[in-house]
Amino acid sequence: MDSFKARFRLAAIVILSIGIALVGIYDLVKPIKNGCNMTYMYPTYIPISETKSLSSSKYGLFLYHEGWKKIDYDEHLKQLNGVPVLFIPGNGGSYKQVRSLAAESDRAFEGGPPEPLLYQEASLMFEDGVEMDKTDIPVLNQYTSRLDWFAVDLEGEHSAMDGQILEEHTEYVVYAIDRILDQYKESREAREKEGAVESRSLPNTVILVGHSMGGFVARAAVVHPNLRKSAVETVITLSTPHQSPPVALQPSLGQYYEYINQQWRKGYEVQTSRTGTRLSSPKLSRVIVISISGGGNDYQVRSKLESIEGIVPSTHGFMISSMGMKNVWLTMEHQVILWCNQVVIQVSHTLLSLVDPETGHPISGSRKRLAVLTRMLRSGMPGSLSRQLDSHQQSPHLPVQKERKFTGSHLKSMTACPSKLRWSDEGLERDLYIKTSTVTILAMDGRRRWLDIKELGSDGRNNFVLMTNLLPCYGIRLHLWPEKGTSESDLPLNKRVVEVTSKIAQIPSGPAPRQIEPGSQTEQPPPSAVFWLEPKDMHGFRFLTISVAPSPTISGRPPPAASMAVGQFFNPEEGHKEFSPQSLLLSMYSQKDIFIKEDHPIAMNITFSISLGLLPATVSLETTGCGIKKSGLPVEEAGDVDSGKLCKLRCFPPVALAWDASSGLHIFPNLYSRTIEVDSSPALWTSTQGSEETNVLLLVDPHCSYKTSAAVSPTAAGRRFLLLYFSQITGFCFAVVFFALMKQANAWELDLPVPSLLSAVESNLRLPIPFLLLAVLPILIGLVYSCLSPKPFPSVGSFFVVSMICYLIANGIIIILILTTQILSHVVARVHVFFKTRWKWRMLDLTPSFFSSKVNRVINTSLLAIVLVCFVHPALGLLVLLFSHVVCCHHALCSFFTASSKSRTEDLFGFGNDVKSLNVESEEGLPVDENSSNSPDSARSYGETQLEIFHHRHGLLILHLLSLLMFLPSLVAWLERLSMGHNFPWFLDTVLCMGVVLHGICDSKPEFNVFFQIPGMRGYEIRQGFVYLLAGYCCYLSGLDLAPYKGFYAMAAVGVVSFVFRIIERRNRRNGEPYYSSRKHSHRH
């Protein structure tokens, strides 16, 4: 019965792991529609000559030129006088990927700045209370200087796989920056020799733009000691992992990341004396960093890794998702962000806007530069929308959007429409007085609508929202009036009436419906702007007026095919709906519906109790009525098909807005059926409270009724789980193996049969003691550490549940590895024994003198593995160690099968209830294993001894196989660059892998289980099982920290301790002092 329960438990875990992996991989391979437009160009790449000191470099530097005509390279370089921008490709990228950005920058310079649309723009409020308004930023009619795009050729090396490659790329980028600045000096000198007169100064800074790992290389170059002072002041990164590597497997790669991030944190610290006097400005006080993420469709780099929070202060940079990026509003894949025309155009205009029109060089002040970047990249979405979406938290690393007040002395802060677009009161038709809380505008009728704030905003309806597709100032204007008409006050009209048109914020919209024939009615167009007023905004005012321009007076702009504006005073509390965790989980099988009746609030706040970053949900809206019938039934059930067509003429397409603290605002226009997925990580150790929920704000037509459905997509959930928690699962895999080795060591210490690795893994999953001790206790330790440290405290529920799932998946992966290697070893050993015993094929005897000699095998394996680890590559040394484990396991298993007259599967896999002694004599030609002693005091048979040896070495084989797999990406990158020369491995990787090799050699036999005795406490010993337990805890915590490479520190520590103990044990043995305890492990003759 116990054997059946054990097998069932293991099978359930394996099925869970395989199921999540399959559904996740299925969703990963599906094609993605991103909505990006292609970018076209005529590229020419001009090589930049290298200096004599770097003539043998394997990398290169190029200057991009846009145009189809053939040019003279030397003459083109001689005319170089723009703003230098250096593009750094990412992992496996090419310098030619600069072509999209460079081509669009050239077109943007020729075409000039885009015409302003007068929507609300983002502005800054710094921590010291100083406000940077858009009035402090000059409005450009033409860009001053062209961007000169350079790109480094890094030979397509995989910098994400090896820390040494990453450091070499950084050193070459530092050289490239110096070479670019020198090239401008050389170009000027060449022009002056020809008689040219130069008035502009030479550039002394280079703007860095990096994609993927190239963005991290850019940041590493900024803090490199050989970089010129103030040579880099602006860094733009595209889909760059800043917090940690995307796959944190190699120790040196993770350590290099930590070192660079620490240098950046120190670079923004103010140097003070003991008395508190400020000694100097921070080293990086002039450096601005902007991180642009691809959003949820970027499967290679998650938004959590692209955040610069904790590295760069909010006064010197921010992260923005392409989903919330101004004029982009799209999520895209990792490589698509380089050629997506919407992104490329916006970045090009942003970089050109950084050029000071007076000097022709990038703006020197860091605050002004950050203000320009904020205005050009971030949406001007009202802060009230963000508060509705996420009342419990705001993204702390984003610049604070300015909140304007319209009363008292703040009346002057509002920006009115330009004077050339102002309408006179005489140009408007007669006024309309709105008596209902909802106002609808279906045409550009040239009328002004009056709304009484006191009357219509009563009964808690103190918020006003307007959805429209009319352009601010051109097509619609809004004013707040303290009183209607004339007043006895002596103040002029412009002092009493405040225009709030500038609060209209742009949102993405789909294509407008086509008009079938002139004069015919079309479907409602999608809204392109939202206007939101809170109670504090309307305080002190009595009326709100909405003025719509007449069609002939819209400054030459063609009117939209259908004009639309819908506004409403509403109570935010009335529009709150919630999907409970139970309903969301059940929605995997049957979707959950919520009916919204007519005359509902225009803003519906829907709460998903489970984060859509973990369980993406497909949200669909179906129009069930629009005033034609007062039923909540679908149109088809009502039996009136024409009413459905009519509803499309009356109801504007709904818009959904979701907020994520990591990547900001997500906007989903024309929401009829869409999978809403925010790129949050709600169950990580570093997550904050409240991240386990997602609020979605639906802006829907109040005249219509809807059926809202939500269903969790299992495939999307599996994909998100694999992407978010791969590093955590990897760290847990090491912990599972260490816990299994602990179980084997404890059995040896208690003089019990050493269980198989599979049996040890299964026993550690049993409730209550083993599972609570090994799976739950490390989580509690992590939570206690979060309480005692500055780290944010995660949401306990989601953090615990997801960690348990990750732990079970890690067990499933280890079980699959164990079964695969064990079945393979079983088959090979069976075949070997069959041919050797039946046909006497001595050539298949894999135990010649080299392998049967204990001393020779250990010495040769040790020397070869250490030499490869130190001088070639750590993975090759681990491969030699793995081969020694394979040979020993094969020999022990062959000996077991040969000595057994009838071997049973239960004994091999460790699930037999009663293990019978195999009292079989050793056969002729079968060598005695080196792990066996000749003591006749043990009742263990030779077959049992060999089986225990196989179980022990099999555990080491799985552990060191995982170690080899961790270094496999680095080995692939090393093999790809063999032809370019050889460098010694990093010292950190060498030291840690030497510790792993020492562990595999010194602990190759299970008989030494005491590491050392506690001084002054006779009889108390630190045994091997306890050391394995501590190592497992360390690997578990490193997995929670998304740094599985830190598990190498635990393995190396175990190896060093084992090596020291073996030296002490040998010395004591020579002195006749039995320092260790050993179970009598021998076979009977």
Image (cartoon, helix red, strand yellow):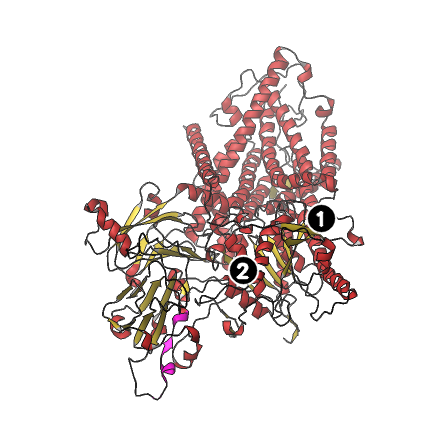
Give the numbered dot on residue 309: 2
**Answer yes or no: do the residues labelled 1 and 2 have beta carbons within 8 Å?**
no
In the rendered structure, the answer to whether residue 198 lies left or right of residue 321 reads: right
In the rendered structure, the answer to whether residue 380 lies left or right of residue 562 reads: right
Residue 694 in the image: above or below residue 359: above
Residue 94 placed where, x, y %? 63, 47
> In which image quadrant can residue 877 be found?
top right
Where disc 2 sits, the SS reads: loop
* Neighbourhood count class around disc 1 (C-alpha, 10 Å): few under 14, some 14–19, many 20 upward: some
> In which image quadrant can residue 889 be found?
top right
Give the numbered dot on residue 552: none
Residue 947 magenta: no
Residue 99 placed where, x, y %? 60, 51
What's the amino acid at mark 1? Answer: Tyr
Look at mark 1 in the image and give the residue it sits on: 59
The answer to whether residue 629 is seen in the rendering is yes
Q: Quadrant of the N terminus?
A: top left
Residue 1059 in the image: above or below residue 329: above
Where disc 1 sits, the SS reads: loop
What's the amino acid at mark 2? Answer: Glu
Q: Which residues are magenta?
A: 487-502
Q: Work out how far the residue at label 1 is from the one at label 2, CA to CA, in angstroms.
A: 32 Å
Residue 352 in the image: above or below residue 210: below
- Between 928 and 526, the residue placed more toward the observer is 526
The answer to whether residue 1014 is seen in the rendering is no
* Neighbourhood count class around disc 2 (C-alpha, 10 Å): few under 14, some 14–19, many 20 upward: many
- Between 47 and 1004, the residue placed more toward the observer is 47
Residue 10 placed where, x, y %? 45, 33
Residue 325 in the image: above or below residue 868: below
Q: Earlier in the sequence, mark 1 or mark 2?
A: 1
